[in-house]
Structures are given as structure tokens and as C-alpha cells.
Image (cartoon, rainbow, N blue to C red):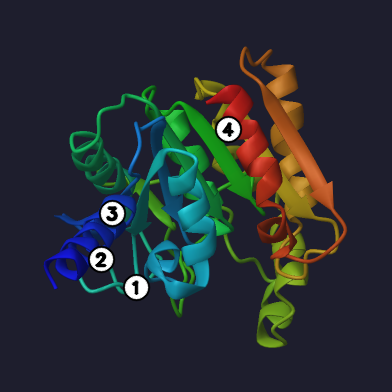
Amino acid sequence: MKLLFKIAFLLIFTCNLVKGQDTIQSKNTDAVLYKPSKNVRGLVVGFGGSEGGNAWASKRWKTVRDQFLDKGYAFLALAYFGSVNSPKQLDKIEIQDVHNTIDIAKSKVPTDKIAVIGGSRGADLALLLGSYYSDISCIVGLSSSHAVFPGNTDHFSTSSWTFGGKELPFVPVNEAAVPFMMERKIRKAFEAMLQDKTAEEKSLIKVENIKAPVLLMSGTDDEICPSSEMSEKIIQRLKNKRFHYRYEHIEFKGGHSEPYQHFDKVFDFLQNNF
């Protein structure tokens, strides 16, 4: 009986080591920090997209999340809208609030290395964080945008993001985009909005300010937005600005979610650049 008890205790203890986690509550965010059982190689922060909530803490992403842990990375699943304590909508999200939560997580793991990975609007957030904060060590954007777009409100008249309380310039919904939005042809709406080259230029994410390697992945047949084309614009901007860090854009044949099927590429990039 004592032997069985010891075995059961060891199994529970080992499980807790592998799947150890902390809930982090900070202003306008909800986050869960998962810790690996072995030495921490770095902290990876995951952002979901326009679906909201904490996608990376869900059962759907457990397998991928566990792969990060198995490789020795601590993993922070962070909700920046659509969760209990975060804003209800993707609208005027304060980038500083997100970084403050990352800081809290970093204080709980023995590492100074931070990688941020996001999908869709979460990829935009990852790039924006890197453009504002020099402590971001690596960036992975899946189906990224190259510019800031409106928040997901009924009126689409405000920015998705703020910094220091000020809205970031964004590409507005123009008359050409309205019919497509009414027909739910989202990609066509994005393409119509991007006809406004003056607004596009003012709304570009300043990726040249990033001080970290950047990996972009996209689907060539993206039905939501022209992510491959926008990712290429990021790459061209980095080239033009003579970016000093490693950068790469990998295209896959497929839709908006296709990059999520290729985490082997993400792990390879982290292994070599993080």
C-alpha cells in the first residue's frame, strides 16, 4: 500500500512539473504561464487572433503548447481581448498593458529571452510589440498584416491598437470596401481599403525598429486578408531599411490558417535564432 502511494505521489509530482502553470492577472489582460520541467531556454508568448479569448490556453492548442514545453520553453498564453478581465472587443488595445503582463511572466521564469508568436491580428500585435520594445528577442507572425487596421466595432472608426493611450494610425474602411464587408467578402474589403495608399503609408508597422529575428508565414490563398502580399511588403521594408537581424517569409499553398499546420518551421526558426 505504501509503495502504491509513493508511486501515485511521484506520478502526480512529475505531472505537475511538466504541466506547472500560473495564472497571471494584470490590467486588461488574462494570461496563463506554463513552465517546463527542465531548464528554461526562453519564454514564448502566444497571442490569438480576432476570435478573442485565450486561444493558446485552450484544449485545441494543448498539443502544440506542450511541444514548446517539451523543448524547454516556458509558454505564456495571453488574452488581450474577449476574456474575463480584458476588453470585450478588439478595439484600442493598449500595447503597454500586454507588455506589462509579459514583464510579470518574465519575473517568474529564469530567462531574459522573450519570443512572441501570434496569428492574424495576434501577429500584428507581435510585430508591434517588437517595434516598441527592445527586450523582445524573436518574433513569429502567422498570417500577418503590414499595417494597422480598424478595431472590430460596429462603426470601424477607431484603431485596433493604442500606445501610451494614443490610437495608432490605421487604414480606414473606405467606400470601396463597404459593399464587400456587407457581403462578408473580407479579403476583398481589405484589398479595397489598401487602395488608399496615403492611409496605408501612415499606418505601416515600423518593423525596422524591431531588434530581433522575424519569421513570417502565410497562405497564398488566404481568404481573410492578403497576408502573403502584406508579409512580402514587410520583407521589402526590412530590406530597404537594411534590417540587421535574420528575417524570413515562408509561403504555403492554402488559406488563412495554413501556417498553423507547419509549426516544425517555427521550432526550427526558434532553435536557430532564439
Please give the name of the residue rendered at 32% of the width and 24% of the height, measured from the top-left corner: 112
Task: Tell me where residue 8 sits by quadrant.
Answer: bottom left
Residue 273, horizontal then vertical, whole percent: 59, 24
Q: Are marks 1 and 2 in contact (CB under 8 Å)?
A: yes
Q: Position of residue 87 (x, y in %)?
A: 28, 68
Query: Tag 2 or tag 4, which sits nearer the N-term?
Result: 2
Give the structural element (helix, strand or loop) at label 4: helix
Q: Secondary structure at mark 3?
A: helix
Disc with the residue nearer the chain's start (3 vs 1) = 3
Of the two numbered discs 3 and 2 on the same chain, state the one appearing first in sequence: 3
Q: Assign a secondary structure to mark 1.
A: loop
Real-space Cα distance between discs 3 and 2?
A: 33 Å
Q: Amino acid at mark 1?
A: Gly
Classify residue 189 by image quadrant: bottom right
Amino acid found under the numbered disc labelled 3: Thr
Residue pointed to by mark 2: 86
Number of residues whose C-alpha sits closer than 10 Å to that of mark 3, classed few (under 14), some (14–19) or many (20 or more): few
Q: Amino acid at mark 4?
A: Leu
Q: Residues within 10 Å of mark 2 (few under 14, many from 20)?
A: many
In the foreground, 33 or 13: 13
Vertical placement of residue 56 versus 107, above or below: below
Between label 4 and label 2, give the one nearer the viewer: 4
Q: Amino acid at mark 2?
A: Ser
The residue at which mark 3 appears reads as: 14
